[in-house]
Image (cartoon, helix red, strand yellow):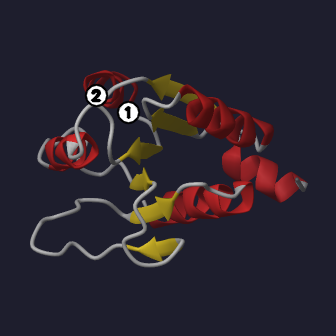
Amino acid sequence: MCADESKETSGKRVLVVDDDRDFRDFCKMVLEKDGYQVSVAHSGQEGRDLARSERPDVMLLDMMMETWSEGSNVADELRSSPETKDIPIIMVSAVDMQNPVTDVEDVDGFLQVDYYLVKPVKPEDLLLRVKEALKGS
């Protein structure tokens, strides 16, 4: 990582919400190595609570946790709240809705997210989307 990239990521906070411990650990390792501060949540409810209390700069959110729609429900709630509506959300799922790395258009309110990543996620794709989300916020 060059000095300019270190300045970009230093102090930026990322919240990872996923019920898969291995994926949370992977994200935490990749992001911290790149200079981000990372918090993790194990469920949608914990993710909602941390998003409200910590106000992360960007959020990685699993689509399917306890229920198939838990992630999209969390995204909808965060988008409808004035204090969290501007947090960039990157939805992560094993379900490939289009391409491995793609922008998601809000189709009739289905997904209230900024980006979509398909698992398994390559480290470089994860870092790219987080950086893009931060630039867009």
Q: Amino acid at mark 1?
A: Arg
Left or right of 74 on screen, residue 21 = right
* Residue 111 figure quarter: bottom left
Can you give x and y, in whole percent of width and height, for residue 121 in the image? 62, 56
How far across and down, in percent of the image, does residue 109 sit? 12, 66
49 shown above or below 131: above
Compared across the picture, whether 70 is left or right of 94 comes to: left
Query: Mark number for residue 101?
Result: none
Q: Residue at x 48, y 35 (%)?
A: 15
Q: Report crowding for label 1: few under 14, some 14 to 19, many 20 or more residues within 10 A (C-alpha).
A: some
- The residue identified by callout 2 is 52
Residue 55's disc number: 1
Q: Amino acid at mark 2?
A: Arg
Q: Nearer the viewer, residue 91 or 85?
A: 91
Q: Residue at x 50, y 31 (%)?
A: 20
Determine whether label 2 and label 1 are within 8 Å by CB.
yes
